[in-house]
């Protein structure tokens, strides 16, 4: 999958993995194969609750294991995620910190985590899921917005740039793959970051999709172009395409994976695709069979469909 993506001019085809996958040697042998995966994302191991479980106390053991394996396997890292409303530790969620303290906590977290992985991350998801479905900012359900307001977003990007000037800095979200209110919100967010003088280099479209609802590639191409016109690159960062366990349709799923590959292939600033796991044995959505290898680690129809989509015209 990765070899074909690179032959089509992309930087990578990659996957999310976890220490759970690494502990399953049969699954991990698939994950380590750089012919299929040239890039790796940690599922949970780099998130705030994992890396700073107590204030000022940083923990990198699990993420380091994944980074070490990726490096040994010739795979690059997309690093995920620095500033998100979810998976924040209790000390932060319930801390009741004021504006200045929250800015300092955020900057300190970014300096430490990005500093620890300096030179090892092709890209960082700096801010994740800051928007509501209507394109407005998440407010009360985000500890960051609640204490800091929208300025937390450019402040986070500036802090990440200071800690690793070579990393591509991304905004990452879901339901922003097609045009609409939320995609427009992302465009406004990119402009906001730039208006503060902070760098932003990419928009990550998570692409948690549903079999049969994907439709034509053209709508993804035009939406990507709207981001690219703002001067950023784009990537599909968490692709999976669920199909109900009651009536799975793996042929349609294969077609839908091929559609997403075709869309990325058509946009030169689409640098690559990451799937959110690779086997239905390990997926965040139970009973949804959204990935490329089945629960017995056998390749599904989607595998060849993706290969052919990278190779086709
Ligand atoms: O670590 C605790 C463990 O100590 C505890 O015993 C156990 C009991 O439930 O929970 C463990 O935490 C779980 C964590 O994954 C690590 O396994 C959480 O309950 C569980 O909610 C968490 O789910 C993750 C989810 O993000 C959280 O929002 C999924 O694994 C992960 O795949 C998912 O990934 C997100 C991306 O980061 C952002 N985009 C959406 C995507 C899918 O939701």
Image (cartoon, rainbow, N blue to C red):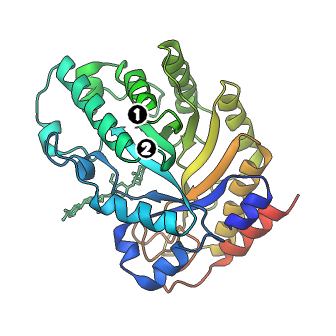
Q: Secondary structure at mark 1?
A: helix
Is residue 216 visible to the viewer in this orientation of the structure? no
Q: Earlier in the sequence, mark 1 or mark 2?
A: 2
Residue that carries the numbered disc 2 in the rendered image: 118
User: Which quarter of the figure is the N terminus placed in?
Assistant: bottom right
Quarter containing ligand 1? bottom left
Q: Which mark is residue 139?
A: none
Q: Is residue 254 left or right of residue 23?
A: right
Q: Is mark 2 within 8 Å of ligand 1?
A: no
- Vertical placement of 217 versus 83: above or below? below
- Vertical placement of 17 versus 41: above or below? below
Is residue 40 visible to the viewer in this orientation of the structure? yes
- Vertical placement of 182 versus 72: above or below? above
Q: Quadrant of residue 184?
A: top right
Tell me the CA gap for discs 1 and 2.
Answer: 7 Å
Residue that carries the numbered disc 1 in the rendered image: 163
Q: In the current view of this chain or complex, which residue is farthest to the right? A: 313
Residue at image location 46% in from the left, 41% down from the top: 125
Q: Nearer the viewer, residue 195 or 288?
A: 195
Residue at image location 71% in from the left, 56% down from the top: 261
Given contact means CB atoms under 8 Å apart, are the residues at marks 1 and 2 in contact? Answer: yes
Give residue 302's position: percent from left, percent from top.
66, 71
Give residue 30's position: percent from left, percent from top.
54, 78
């Amino acid at each position: 999958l990765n070899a074909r993506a690179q032959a089509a001019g992309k930087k990578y085809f990659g996957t999310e993995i976890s220490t759970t996958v690494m502990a399953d040697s049969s699954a991990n042998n698939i994950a380590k194969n750089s012919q299929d995966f040239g890039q790796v994302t940690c599922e949970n191991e780099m998130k705030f609750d994992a890396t700073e479980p107590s204030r000022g106390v940083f923990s990198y053991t699990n993420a380091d294991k994944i980074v070490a394996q990726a490096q040994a396997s010739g795979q690059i890292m997309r690093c995920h995620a620095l500033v998100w409303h979810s998976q924040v530790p209790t000390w932060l969620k319930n801390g009741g910190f004021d504006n200045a303290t929250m800015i300092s906590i955020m900057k300190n977290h970014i300096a430490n985590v990005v500093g620890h992985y300096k030179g090892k991350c092709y890209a960082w998801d700096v801010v994740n899921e800051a928007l509501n479905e209507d394109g407005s900012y998440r407010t009360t359900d985000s500890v960051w917005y609640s204490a800091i307001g929208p300025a937390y977003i450019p402040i986070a990007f500036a802090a990440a740039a200071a800690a690793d000037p070579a990393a591509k800095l991304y905004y990452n979200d879901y339901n922003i793959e097609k045009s609409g209110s939320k995609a427009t919100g992302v465009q406004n967010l990119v402009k906001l970051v730039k208006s503060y003088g902070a760098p932003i280099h990419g928009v990550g479209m998570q692409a948690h999709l549903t079999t049969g609802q994907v439709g034509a590639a053209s709508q993804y191409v035009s939406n990507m172009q709207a981001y690219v016109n703002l001067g950023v690159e784009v990537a599909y960062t968490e692709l999976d395409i669920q199909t109900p366990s009651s009536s799975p349709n793996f042929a349609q799923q294969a077609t839908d994976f091929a559609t997403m590959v075709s869309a990325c292939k058509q946009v030169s600033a689409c640098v690559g695709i990451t799937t959110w796991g690779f086997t239905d044995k390990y997926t965040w959505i139970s009973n949804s069979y959204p990935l490329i290898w089945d629960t017995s680690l056998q390749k599904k129809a989607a595998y060849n469909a993706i290969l052919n989509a990278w190779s086709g015209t």
